[in-house]
Image: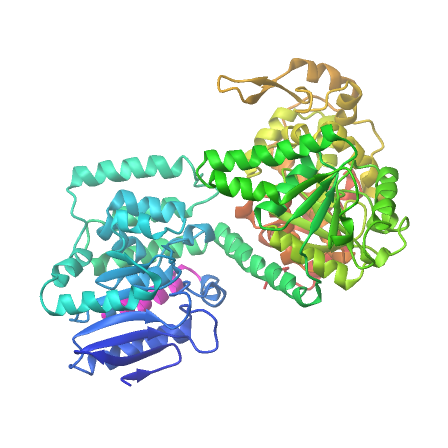
Amino acid sequence: MIHAGNAITVQMLQDGIAEFRFDLLGESVNKFNKATIDDFQAAIAAVQAHPEIQGLVVTSAKSTFIVGADITEFGENFAQGEQVIQDWLVSIHQVFNSFEDLNIPKVAAINGMALGGGFEMCLVCDYRVMAQSAQVGLPEIKLGIFPGFGGTVRLSRIIGIDNAVEWIAMAVPKKPDAALKDGAVDAVVADDKVVAAALDLVKQAIAGRLDWKTKRQEKLDPVKLNQIEQMMAFTTAKAAVLSKANPAQYPAPKLMLDSLQAGATLTRDEAVKIEAQGFAKAAVTPQAEALIGLFINDQVVKKASKKHEKGAHPINQAAVLGAGIMGGGIAYQAASKGTPIIMKDIGNPQLALGMSEANKLLTKQVERGKLTAAKMGETLTRIRPSLSYDEFKEVDIVIEAVTENPKVKEIVLADVESKVRDNTILASNTSTISITRLAKALKRPENFVGMHFFNPVHMMPLVEVIRGEHTSEEAIATTVVLAQKMGKTPIVVNDCPGFLVNRVLFPYFGAFDLLLKDGADFQQIDKVMEKFGWPMGPAYLMDVVGIDTGVHGAEVMAEGFPDRMKPDFKGSIETLYEAKRLGQKNDVGFYKYELDKKGKKAKVVDATTYDLIAAVVTGEKREFDPQEIIDRMMLALCNETVRCLEDKIVATPHEADMAMIMGIGFPAFRGGPCRYVDQTGVAEYVALCNTYAHLGKAYEAPQLLRDMAENNKKFYG
């Protein structure tokens, strides 16, 4: 054994070739943390001290190659400022450069995922062999940063500027065929041949049949394009990237492009310094803090869900009651992920609608090349439409998805309870109705749980799993596991009107209604909030949700939280509802919806809207300061999020923020309501609440925030 460390071992194989093997002790995956970096340096020194080594095969003892840098550990550096980050990266570059500069050929045997720093490790090798099941890529842009271990420099010299920009900016892992086509890897082989193929390449390099030194030199020299070619390449790349990523919201792509362009005319040693400078600028942005925070929050949510796995009972057969758009969507989602599901309704037309929805979604998958016709047929066979309960004795969990009416739900739930086994879980897909209330109609309330899907089911990643007063841990665990099997992210919340997501959303709509009453223009509000980062403004969102749905939800919220959600005025939303303007459901709400040239519904301004809501506007019509609009909208939303933490509706800020990102499209680069409060400054946020407290209870800072401000505390770290 030449070297045996905590993360890397080096041992001779044959004919002067050694294996440089990553195997981080105590971890299920290899990653670049401080221990790995230190051991990397020591392993390089060990190789340098053994002149009999003529070549290296770089391998992994794990099922993955290297998943990347340990962002939870390295992220601590980001709080220490640009210079510290830059110096830290320069020290890492020295290690990577010293490995690249070993005067022997080196081949990476990529047996599994090689992402971020893991793929950057592959790039310092002279050749790369990729297993058929492996994937490679640089996903750092998703974290508000960009590759910092030399990835921008080496990749642009290996596959060209255009391809490198696309790889880094899109941040999508590449499969073997795409990686080989672009020249990022040199060979693709069967999984069990990857080490042998890498070994063969090293032998050829040692024998002089491969010019590995020239290949390596290309990474050390400036990009081989003249000034005009470079200018054209970067002009095109910037236009493409910045048209999709607003630098004000996502600064990392522009900083990456600037860094790549500045380093293109320099040698590797100078270019990686430029990369370090650009990376440090990106790392200290609030967007990087927020997006890295979301990555960590996602891990917290997954760990919370994993705790439920042992308590779940097996799910071999599911059922959904109600075969409308929602029921069909739920059936599609379950079947597409391998869970057989019975779809029951009271009539053939309803079943036809549900099957049509599932068929439509599957057909789109086939048209996009993501699914074969055979797989579509196989998926459809997992959905069994039924008019009776005949097969329900075999069902492990039933999802009720009938109309959002408590009396109807109570009747349906009581009926199905009498038709299933004593241990079958019943789950209600309700968006607002109390689970504890619905459970009163049941003989076995311990088996009853809320399972709130968001519309459209196939697109929205979140499922709220709602614990009623009598819900058992087994019911929670089984529902969580089903949500995961369906490809969703479950977050467990406690019961209250609106649960978590809708409880938080309706004060936001209430703030919107109050702004309109005070004389604001709904178009201006939409534009301001979309510029703030929301995918759509509140007027447009209300049209998409359905104004009738909004009015119904507001009534439930007003009954549950009258002190802050029961307005003392008639608002614009209710006024439009009374005028039978339901939004996109009937093509007229705040906006009108007309078919565009492509046959898609497009919103257009409707002057009638202003005439209708004029009767409920009591303030002077004026253009508001954009910041006042933002403050009034966000205070109402963030305050209710904090109250949900106070009331133990949701367990942690991590889960609360993830729910808002996934459930209502809270701007990801702002990290969620709790992160938004942190980045505003808790004391400053409380002061802002005091400024607007005269508008009502919804704007008053919750006690939790007042205590945090007094004790100089934050939600995160």
Q: Residue 265 vs residue 58: left or right?
A: left
Residue 40: percent from the left, percent from the top?
Answer: 32, 74
Whether 292 is drawn above or below 362: the answer is below
Count of marks, rendered view: 0
Residue located at (51% from left, 43% from top): 375
Quarter occupied by residue 219: bottom left
Residue 273 seen from this side: yes
Residue 262: percent from the left, percent from the top?
Answer: 26, 48
Residue 507 magenta-highlighted: no
Magenta span? 81-98
Quarter occupied by residue 484: bottom right
Residue 82 magenta-highlighted: yes
Outermost left residue? 208
Residue located at (69% from left, 20% from top): 586
Task: Tell me the quadrant of the picture where the C terminus can be found.
Answer: bottom right
Q: Nearer the viewer, residue 136 or 483?
A: 483
Residue 562 seen from this side: no
